[in-house]
Image (spheres, grey):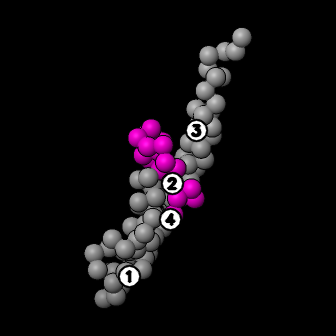
Amino acid sequence: MSKPGYKDQSMWIRLVFMALYWGLINLAVCVFGFLLVIVTIIKLASRYEPYTLGGWLTSLSTFIQQSFRFLAFQTEEKPFPFQAWPNGDDNGH
């Protein structure tokens, strides 16, 4: 006779992935904050518009959003590296 909680192996595997993505979200938020500071400094110090860094910020924010959707049980699709890295072309140019 098996215990009821141990029957659904997919939930246990999902919990492992949720722990992994929780760590990745923390790392991604730190990188996002660092890039945000760099972009702000560049915009304040020059007239240069950092489109590349803006694209990275867009990609990273999309990854963070996808990860939170997975953690909140809104989707079963795992974000990067199980899907392609989000595209950062949504920066309006």
> In the structure shown, which secondary structural element does the residue marked by tag 1 occupy?
loop
Region in magenta: 67-85
Q: Which of the two labelled residues, at mark 2 and mark 4, occupies the earlier sequence position?
A: 2
Q: Are marks 2 and 4 in contact (CB under 8 Å)?
A: no
- How far apart are the alpha carbons under marks 4 and 1? 20 Å
> Which numbered dot is residue 79?
2
| Nearer to the camera, 34 or 24 | 24
| Distance Cα–Cα, label 2 vs label 1 | 26 Å
Task: Please report whichever mark, 3 or 2, sits nearer to the chain's N-terminal start.
Answer: 3
Residue assigned mark 3: 14
Per the image, label 2 sits on a secondary structure element best described as loop
The answer to whether residue 28 shows anywhere in this view is yes
Task: For the C terminus, give its image quadrant.
Answer: bottom left
Q: For this view, does 27 lie left or right of residue 56?
A: right
Q: Which badge, 3 or 4, is on the more N-terminal residue?
A: 3
Quarter of the image holding residue 62?
bottom left
